[in-house]
Amino acid sequence: MRRAAQALAGDGGPPLAAIAADHGYADQAHFGRECRHWLGQTPARLRASKDLLASVQSSGYG
């Protein structure tokens, strides 16, 4: 999850489905459910908020 969340950085980043596939999720919906479970936000919301994204990417998170 942490590596997938790090891949969300940047507005012009890869599509969510590509991030899901690259990080071992069955599909984009699976990635979204796991992201919401572990990080409390959907991938799209994390990508849209630089503050939220920075907090899940910090070294002390986990």
Image (cartoon, rainbow, N blue to C red):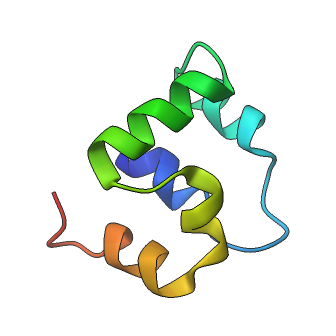
Instruction: Pinpoint residue 27: horizontal percent, then vertical percent.
Output: 65, 19
The answer to whether 35 is drawn above or below residue 47 in the figure is above
Q: Quadrant of residue 1?
A: top left
- Residue at 59% x, 64% y is 45
* Total marks in image: 0
Residue 31, horizontal then vertical, whole percent: 53, 31
Q: Residue at x 62, y 31 (%)?
A: 20
- Establish if 35 lies above or below 14: above
Farthest residue, direction right: 12
Q: Position of residue 30 (x, y in %)?
A: 53, 22
- In the image: residue 48, left or right of residue 39: right
Say which residue appears at 59% left-offset and 13% top-offset: 26
Q: Quadrant of the C terminus?
A: bottom left
Residue drawn at 47 percent across, 73 percent down:
53
Say which quarter of the image contains residue 35.
Answer: top left
Residue 9, horizontal then vertical, whole percent? 62, 69
Is 40 on the left-hand or right-hand side of 35? left
Q: Is residue 44 above or below residue 30?
A: below
